[in-house]
Amino acid sequence: MTILKDIVVSNHYIFCEGFADWTDAIQAAAEPLRADGIIEDSYIRSIIENVKEYGPYIIIAPEVAMPHSTLGGEGVHDTCLSFMKTEKPVVFDPEDPSKNARLFFTLAATDNEKHLSNMVALAEFLLKDGAIEDLLKAQNADDLMKVHWKYSEQ
Amino acid sequence: MIKILICCASGSGTSQLMAITAQKACKSVGVEANVKHCPIAEGKSSARNYDLVLTSPAFIKMFDSAKAAGVNVYPLKNPLSQDEIIAALKAAGYVS
């Protein structure tokens, strides 16, 4: 499992206090990829539009969001993911607290095969006992690396 | 061999994750399955060719016509939950 390590090494992470508006949260979560030219504003807009249209289907587990739009879509130039953690939960649906999130894995994909292996690795990591709890406690890149090493050994 | 179709808005993120979970779940209960995932727009028309369709609760209504044609359609709330998928397999009668 090298997703977290890759995120740290390529500087694709951000720690934030919180956001009153989920659209700002998605913007911030995607910023490390945008800053590197991996995605463009049009891709971020498309993520936000999809959530507006279909609801928060990007919440993949309690506390975990996976902002993404179409594979190989407009404004995407590489395959990778970024990580954001917020101290305060971001609310997607005021009537459904199970759709709150503090961990964001933003996806960008142009290469189907690499994307699939990223997804498998992400799923396997998040399904490990304690992985989500440990990420929720992380405060910086060192903590992310500690989580990486802890779960790499399993 | 049962044919499972999994759909989400983009067909590359949430449904991909659900497909990974579904493969694991099917294996764990000994069901042989061919799992495909795609965007809603594509899945709406091809759903009839599958035995089981799984999708986010938000999209379930889009499969009303497939359901009427006899396809088993179930919502998945948590894309990482094998239990939800096993429950759907049970409800559809593929697992006792």
Image (tube, rainbow, N blue to C red):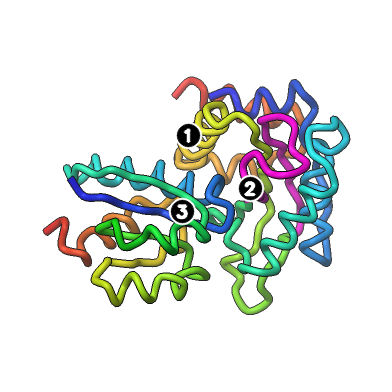
**Label 1, label 3: how far apart the Cα atoms are:** 12 Å
Of marks 1 and 2, the one in the foreground: 2
Q: Name the image quarter holding the C terminus of chain A.
A: top left
Q: Earlier in the sequence, mark 1 or mark 2?
A: 2
Q: Dot 1: within a 10 Å radius of its alpha carbon, few (fewer than 14), some, or many (20 or more) residues?
A: some
**Which amino acid, by three-letter code, is at mark 2?**
Thr
**Label 1, label 2: how far apart the Cα atoms are:** 18 Å
**Which amino acid, by three-letter code, is at mark 1?**
Val
**Which amino acid, by three-letter code, is at mark 3?**
Pro
Marking on residue B33: none
**In the orientation shown, which residue stands out farthest toward the right?**
A35
* Image coords of residue A1 (percent x, y): 53, 24
**Image point 77% across, 63% down: which residue?**
A22
Q: Are marks 3 and 2 in contact (CB under 8 Å)?
A: no
Marking on residue A70: 2
Q: Quadrant of residue A30?
A: top right
Give, as a single range, the part of the protein colored magenta.
A66-88
Q: Are marks 1 and 3 in contact (CB under 8 Å)?
A: no
Q: Quadrant of residue A49?
A: bottom right
Label 3 chain ID: B
Do callouts 1 and 2 point to residues on the same chain?
yes
Q: Dot 3: within a 10 Å radius of its alpha carbon, few (fewer than 14), some, or many (20 or more) residues?
A: many
**Label 3, label 2: how far apart the Cα atoms are:** 17 Å
In this rendering, the count of numbered labels is: 3
Say what secondary structure mark 3 lies in. Answer: loop
Q: Which residue is mark 1?
A: A120
* Image coords of residue A143 (percent x, y): 70, 31
Q: Quadrant of residue A137?
A: top right
Label 1 chain ID: A
**Is residue B94 placed above or below A141 in the rendered structure?**
below
Marking on residue B79: 3
- Is residue A85 magenta-colored? yes
